[in-house]
Image (cartoon, helix red, strand yellow):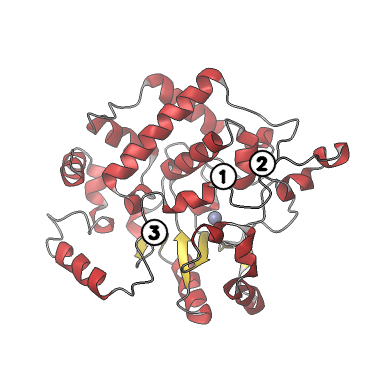
Amino acid sequence: MKRRDFLKMSMASSPLLLAGCSIWPHLCRSCHPDQEAANKTTAATAPVEIAEPNENADLAETQDVSPKKTQLQLSDELLKDQRAKSVYFSQDFPDDIYFKGEKFDTMKTLTMKFRAVQKNIGFGNFNLISMDDFFRFSTASASIGGITAAEKKFLEEIFYFDAQKYGFTGQKVMHKFTDNVPKNKAVKIPRSGHYLIGGESVEVYNRVRKDIGESLILTSGVRANAKQFHLFFEKALSTQGNVSKASRSLAPPGYSFHGRWDFDVGKIGYGLKNFSDDFANTDEYKRLLDLGYINIRYTQSNLLGVRFEPWHIKVEDV
Ligand SMILES: [Zn+2]
């Protein structure tokens, strides 16, 4: 099914998405007939070095591109030290929790469905959909064939599972499985393929770009629950079901501050390195720190069990 037909059908059956039409103008040609021409103009005048992200662009955050890929022999002392987990985030620890067997298979099937919905509705829009939207889009697609009751139960159980048991001690941000981001306040950030919520986030982003320059770009903005589930599952597949290890690099669903105001920045042309410690060596990062108005949520050796994320900008003070 073509993306346009899929959206037409899904929107017709979804009052929520119809109401949110203002945030899908580049896809909703019935309300924004001039948008296709506008998109072409933008594409023609956009600087060549800033490419639209492809469908997997921010999956970079789920990849481990650090040089610490091979398993190290950590001392017994380090293996018991919570702080070691944020430094040696890509290592296995003895108390790590795994999804195995049926759980792993269900996660894999759902990952395929998240990928398919993202492909159908578009990379940018996928950042903003709620779990209910995800179910609706899945049902509307003959090739996806909907989400089973068992799969829904699995998703809900993961959402309400206490992530401290994975070793992740960050705060819960989205409290309900059905919670969503305020779509009517979402602002698409030009040439990034991502959205920020209007207000503080957009102000901080604009200020950062003004001070650092146009070499700085948004690499991941607001992410609703479906997007966070997708990223987390992709990460957990790459760790062979080690969900503790996955949670050291990516907040589990419901625990990401991308669900509120936080966002990630990178250096144009820096690719996957934007989501590695290498970003901390860029002039852009050094200037971010020198200017001093940016808080980094996950610092080095943090006690939250999360890797150092120099690219992640904390907006809201909580
Ligand atoms: Zn982030």
Q: Disc 2, disc 1: CB below 8 Å? A: yes
Which residue lies under the disc numbered 2?
168
76 left or right of 51 in image:
right
Which residue lies under the disc numbered 1?
255
Assign ligand 1 to one image quadrant.
bottom right
Q: Image height check: is 273 above or below 229?
A: below
Q: Is residue 2 visible?
A: yes
The tag earlier along the polypeptide, 2 or 3, is: 2
Pointer 1 residue Cβ closer than 8 Å to ligand 1? no
Using the image, tell me which numbered label, if any, was put on residue 194: 3
Q: Image height check: is 203 above or below 297?
A: below
* Alpha-carbon span between mark 2 and mark 1: 9 Å
Mark 2: amino acid: Phe
Q: Is residue 253 visible?
A: no
The tag earlier along the polypeptide, 1 or 3, is: 3
What x and y, as percent, mark residue 143? 25, 29
